[in-house]
Each structure stands twice: as structure tokens, then as C-alpha cells.
Image: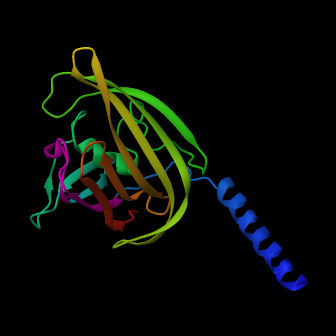
Amino acid sequence: MAKPTLLFVLAAAILWNTAILFAQEQAPAPSFKEGDTWQFNISRKGQIFGSTNYFEGMYELSVTQGVVKLYDINSGQKNEIPIKPDGPSQGLLRLIGKADQYQRPYLKFPLSVGQKWTYQYEGRFPGSKFYSRRSAEVNVVGIEQVTTPAGNFKTYKLIWSETWPITVSKGHQEHGGNTFTYFYSPETRSVVRSSNVAVNSPGTVETELIKFMPGN
């Protein structure tokens, strides 16, 4: 009986020490190089509220002369897409931490397991003229191995939940919301996979890193 008990204790000790090491690990803020290039595939499954405000298909982000450029590569040709301060292009920039991190901090470096932050911002639904106050919370919940067409990566798993009030009728409000689950890889200096599920919506928006080409 003593031997199985000893093995159990040793296994528990290894798991505990591994958990401590993971908790102590940190992902530093990325340093981008000239020519760094990422290709992502974005797909929608089911019906998404305001889905026309999302990109879908294959897109490329590339660092050129210190500036991030965005390209549509769905037609087999690279067509540059203008990056606007308030638009779906910001969703792609967030994948490498280059969106407006002050208004909506999608990533907060250094990343570590157990890290949590909250914030509020003004947002609006596609086609609406009115902004609503949104509350968000981001949690770094663990470290996972994730495989995509770009390779196998050790990643930090983050869950971002946001809610906002919706006026259903006079004197009555409900709440809408989104939940983003995404995986950040220090190796690619980007999110390698993400999934967005909206409250009261049967569909999801999924993003996956297809290729990463480091620059010089």
C-alpha cells in the first residue's frame, strides 16, 4: 500500500509545482519587427446579430515601416483595406494588440495566469446612431496548447465578457452581451484562435491563425 501512496504523493507534488510555474510565468509585451506577417481566417457559424459588421474570410496583417497594414487576400490578390478608428478593422488589429488598448484593452502585458482587469467604454450596434455604456471584464484563466494550420503553440487562454443595457420598453431594460474566448501565443506575438458568442444569438464568429511569418 505504501508504494501506490508514494506515487500518488509524487504525482500530486509534480502537478502542484507545474501549476505554480505556470502561474509565475509571464508573457511580455510583444516587440514587432519589420516584415512580421500574420494571416487569419475568420468564419461565421449560424446567425450573428449585426454580422455585416464583421469581416469574414482570409486577411493579412503586416508590419511595414513600423506601421501595421491590413489586406484582404480572399481573391488570391492582396488588396489593402483602410484601417478606421471605429470599425471591424479594429477587431483584426486586436489580434496583435494594436487596436485602441486604452479604450478596450483586449490584451494587457505582461500576461500571467490569474490576471484580471475591468473597464467600461462607449459602443453602438451596427446601423444605430446611439451609443450605450458597456462594461467588460477580462480574465487570464490558464495556459493551453493550441494547434492551428500555423502550428502548435503554448498559449494564454483569456475570457472577455461584456454587457450593456437594452431598452425593451418604457421603464424596462434587459442586458445584451458578448463572450470572447481567445488564446494568445508569445511565439507568434498574436492571438492564434478566438471565438465570439453573443447573448441571444445562436451563432459564433471564429478566428484562426493560418500562417505566421516573422520579419527581420
Q: Is residue 39 magenta?
A: yes
The single residue placed furthest to the right in the displayed view is 2
Q: In this rendering, is residue 56 above or below 3?
A: above
Query: Residue sitting at 14 percent across and 60 percent down?
Result: 78
Q: Residue 91's x, y, as percent?
A: 29, 45
Number of marks present in the image shown: 0
Instruction: Answer yes or no: is residue 106 visible.
Output: no
Depth check: give the residue in front, 91 or 60: 91
Query: Residue sitting at 79 percent across and 68 percent down?
Result: 13
**What colouring does the structure picture have?**
rainbow
Q: In this rendering, is residue 38 above or below 175?
A: below
Depth check: give the residue in front, 21 or 60: 21
Query: Residue sitting at 28 percent across and 19 percent down?
Result: 172
Q: Which residues are magenta?
A: 35-57
Q: Residue 59's x, y, as percent?
A: 22, 58
Q: Residue 90's x, y, as percent?
A: 28, 42
Q: Is residue 214 magenta?
A: no
Depth check: give the residue in front, 161 or 99: 161
Q: Residue 145's x, y, as percent?
A: 50, 68
The single residue placed furthest to the left in the displayed view is 75
Position of the N terminus by quadrant: bottom right
Q: Is residue 141 left or right of residue 192?
A: right
Position of the C terminus by quadrant: bottom left
Q: Is residue 108 left or right of residue 53?
A: right
Instruction: Answer yes or no: is residue 75 visible.
Output: yes
